[in-house]
Structure formats: C-alpha cells, structure tokens
Image (tube, rainbow, N blue to C red):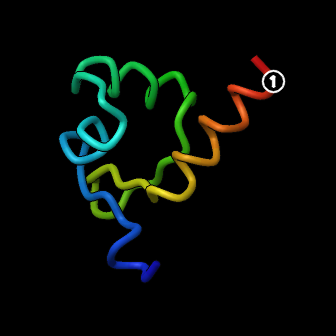
Amino acid sequence: MSLADDLLKGVPEIAHHMGKTERATYHLIYNNQLPHFKIGGRIHARKSELDAAFRSQAVNG
C-alpha cells in the first residue's frame, strides 16, 4: 500500500475508516487511544497503524 493510500486526512476520514462517529473519534484521539499526528493543525492517521492498534487491542483486551 502506498503512503497516499494509507493516509487518512482529518477526523471525518478517520471516523469513517473505523466505523465510528466523529465525536467518538475525537474522544479516542484526545485520550491518546488512537495513533495519530498533526500536520498544520489537522489530525491525520495511517490506516495500517489504526488497523494494527485494533488488532493489538483485540488480542490484549
């Protein structure tokens, strides 16, 4: 997967990828429960890192 295909730009895209509401996604981000980073004040995430984080939680949870 290329970097462009892996990148989610903004909370709406992140929320859609995870199947969550934007509000729930903001909550997870601000409680540092999702891997994310900011570029110019906009929140971004990588699909591969989100998927790996959820796989890890399923195993450890």
Q: From the top left corner, tell me how far across and down residue 8 is, in percent.
A: 31, 58
* Left or right position of 43 against 31: left
Q: Which residue is found at the position 23% from the left and 50% from the top?
A: 10
Mark 1: few/some/many CA within 10 Å (<14, 14-19, 20+): few
The amino acid type of the residue labelled 1 equals Asn
Q: Which residue is found at the position 24% from the left and 19% from the top?
A: 23
Q: From the top left corner, tell me how far across and down residue 17 is, in percent.
A: 31, 43
Q: How many labels does the image show?
A: 1
Q: From the top left corner, tell me how far across and down residue 61 is, in percent.
A: 75, 16
Query: Vertical placement of 15 versus 39: above or below?
Result: above
Q: Which residue is found at the position 69% from the left and 26% from the top?
A: 58
* Left or right position of 38 against 58: left
Residue 29 found in image quarter? top left
* Left or right position of 48 against 58: left
- Judging by the rendered image, the residue that carries numbered circle 1 is 60
Identify the element where label 1 is drawn: helix
The single residue placed furthest to the bottom in the displayed view is 2
Q: From the top left corner, tell me how far across and down residue 47 is, in percent.
A: 44, 56
